[in-house]
Amino acid sequence: MLHDRLEQWAQNYKAEGEMLGLEKGIEKGIEKGFHDGLVNAVSHQVQLRFGAVPAAVLEQLAQASESQLHAYLAGILSASSLEALFGPTQGMR
């Protein structure tokens, strides 16, 4: 009887842990998807405005925060060059 009760608690605990892990995984996946979408939007706008996107810029975008990506999206409207938008980046040209 006690053994059955302990077994049930263990199963419940395991199920709760799996559910919590699943929820956290979904949350992280949504965040990554949103970030990747912003990166794609910025790189597409850069390509339309300035031509081919250098690998150094793609790397900078991949590492940028959400707020920085939003700043790039806004800045592309007034930037006169890649350097004006992203600053001096190694291997830009």
Image (spheres, grey):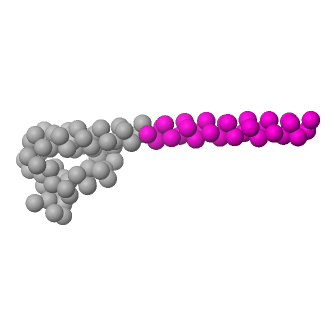
In the rendered structure, the answer to whether residue 21 lies left or right of residue 15 reads left
Residue 89 at x, y = what percent?
18, 60
Residue 19 at x, y = what percent?
61, 36
- In magenta segment, residue 85: no
Which residue is painted at 29% across and 50% down in the image? Answer: 62
> Depth check: 55 or 80 in front?
55
> Depth check: 91 or 72 in front?
91
In the rendered structure, the answer to whether residue 16 lies left or right of residue 43 reads right
Q: Residue furthest right?
A: 1
Can residue 78 be seen here?
Answer: no
Residue 78 at x, y = what percent?
11, 41
Q: Residue furthest bottom?
A: 90
Can residue 30 be seen here?
Answer: yes
Quadrant showing the N terminus: top right
Magenta span of residues? 1-29
Residue 66 at x, y = what percent?
33, 43
- In magenta segment, residue 9: yes
> Depth check: 21 or 3 in front?
3
Which residue is painted at 84% across and 40% down in the image? Answer: 6
- Give the dominant element type of the magenta stretch: helix, strand or loop: helix
Quadrant showing the C terminus: bottom left
Where 61 falls versus 28 (above or below)? Answer: below
Q: Quadrant of residue 79?
A: top left
Which residue is painted at 14% across and 44% down in the image? Answer: 46
> Depth check: 41 or 73 in front?
41
Q: How many marks?
A: 0
Q: Quadrant of residue 49?
A: top left
Which residue is painted at 19% across and 56% down in the image? Answer: 55
